[in-house]
Image (spheres, rainbow, N blue to C red):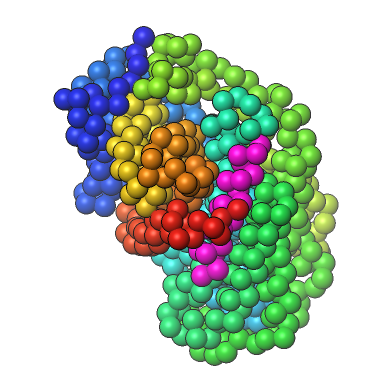
Amino acid sequence: MFQAELAPIAGNLGLSALIACVPLLTFFIMLMGVKAKAHISAAVALVAAILVAVIGWKMPAGYALLSATQGAAFGAFPIAYIIIMAVWFYAVTQVSGRSEDLRRFFDKVGNGDIRIQAMMIAFCFGGLLEALAGFGAPIAVTATMILALGVSAPRAALVVMLANTAPVAYGAVATPITTAGNMVAGGDAAVAAETAQHVAAIVGHQAPVFAVIIPLLIMIILDGKKGARDCWAPALVCGVSFAATQWWCSNHFAYELTDVIATLVSLACVVVFMRFWKPKNVDEMRARFGLDPYSADAHSELTANRTIMALVPYAIVVAVFAVCKLGIPKLLSATDIKIPWPGISGGVVLNAMGKDPGTTFTLNLLSTPGTMLLVAGLLSALVYSLYTENGRYAMTVGAAVRQIGKTAYGMRLSSLTIVLVLSLAYVMNFSGQTLSIGEFLAGSGAAFAVISPILGWVGTAVTGSDTSANALFSGLQHSAATANPALANVTPDLFLASNTMGGVVGKMISPQSLAIAAVATGEKESDIMKMVLPWSIAFLLGLCVLVGLQATVLAPTLP
């Protein structure tokens, strides 16, 4: 039996935490310094993690390798599967020719201003996909849509990564928050539900602070000061309506539906606002983007039927996810197959607290968002096959199925990257490296309130999932806050919210998100990393200050 230690390096927790960072540093140095490809960087970092686990944490080499295989399995299914299905789903609209009509629809709604169109796609529509699917699907789908508008690949990558931060906390029907509640409830379902609701309410006092400014930041990224000056009004409408609805739903309604309602309200507000407000300097902006001047007459051929057909796939995906996530989730999850991972499950590998770190693999064939995207894509192809216009937009279900193979082949290297990154994460988790980092940060007294978000940031940067970050660190956050005399008057749930929000701002630098954005835009992972890292750090610093204030002077404002 192997049980991880918190301070295996000379009995020194600080030194152990520093050594535990070696695999992460290896990955980022290979990616940004050496400029190696992402799958090469991930492979080298995985080797480093195994060496640190075996030499530093005294984990048997066989256990370290088996940990890596479970991570690889999880990376392949459901993560890579979800991402491939998300990219394929959009490919169905491209093969059918309907994606061009969708672009024209957004062009018409935005009165030719691609800055406003990109905001609606990345922030509103992307937020809806995050609310229902998560796991990288919004990045994959919205990036390709924004590229079709004429936005350059680097800007498209940065916009979708930044926009994706707003809804992450409540993503996949608030799975990260539900996970946080479960991790500290000790198996008590009632306590788990109560805790999750309280955490969701606190997050509702944090996430809107960032959401309200992101649409304006999108305008600045797309077109600098001119973008902010010309489009500040719709950006403000978009951000404020989303933030206000996000706060209200999380505190006074079903927190699981927070992002679904917030994105729909935000999109509706922008559409209505654009009927009364006309953007400025549109032709000048389009010239800077290399596009023809805008003409409303150019969209006269976009009939109501073609508009409906362009929107059908997204109506179908919303309906499918609504049924699966809100209607029959228990029925679908009942088909999940629990597989104790051979060689390390059943008490063979334990974390530093003497608990199973998660050595059971769940094969969720029906309940995974990947299968839901597959169903939505096939239904969309079926609808397209039934509705053609004078030979145009011809589509068959067979053509859609063949496109799956083409999509999977085109994403082979990014899928390999994801598999290797999750292998790295599992080795670090099972050996105890991740917990050593967390325990070191937790032992900081009153300063823990300020640095608490860093745990979630690190957890999501490693695993690519806010849900995984909460699974890793929620128990640690709760116990550290409870046992800390300096935080005796602060609810421990604040630090569960802090961990969740730390994961939100760390999502954009996770190798998984970088790989997805790279596939969708054609940019290199290292180049995207350089663009998003300053934003992630800036958001993290702002969050640290906010949580520090909420633990002190703003404590009375918390629910």
Q: Is residue 36 depicted above or below 227 in this figure?
A: above
Q: Position of residue 55 (x, y in %)?
A: 20, 22
Q: Is residue 138 left or right of residue 225?
A: right
Q: Between 338 and 168, which is closer to the camera in this rendering?
A: 168
**Camera-nearest residue between 403 and 43:** 43
Q: Is residue 74 visible?
A: yes
The N terminus: image quadrant: top left
Q: Magenta residues?
A: 193-213
Residue 128 seen in this snapshot: no
Left or right? Give the position of 222 relative to 252.
Answer: left
Assess whether residue 1 is covered by the magenta stretch: no
Q: Position of residue 283 (x, y in %)?
A: 55, 88
Q: Residue sitting at 57 percent across and 46 percent down?
A: 199
Q: Is residue 201 magenta?
A: yes
The residue positioned 58% from the left and 30% from the top of the image is 185
Viewer-proximal residue among 362 and 354: 354
- Dominant SS of magenta comes to helix
Residue 302 picture location, percent across and down: 75, 74
Q: Position of residue 430 (x, y in %)?
A: 38, 24
Horizontal side of residue 41 vs 173, given as left or right: left
Q: Residue at x 29, y 18 (%)?
A: 59
Q: Is residue 86 above or below residue 64?
A: below
Residue at screen point 77% across, 61% down: 309
Q: Quadrant of residue 296?
A: bottom right
Q: Name the residue furthest left.
A: 10
Q: Which quadrant would residue 158 be assigned to in this image?
A: bottom left
- Marks counted in the figure total 0
Q: Quadrant of residue 357?
A: top left
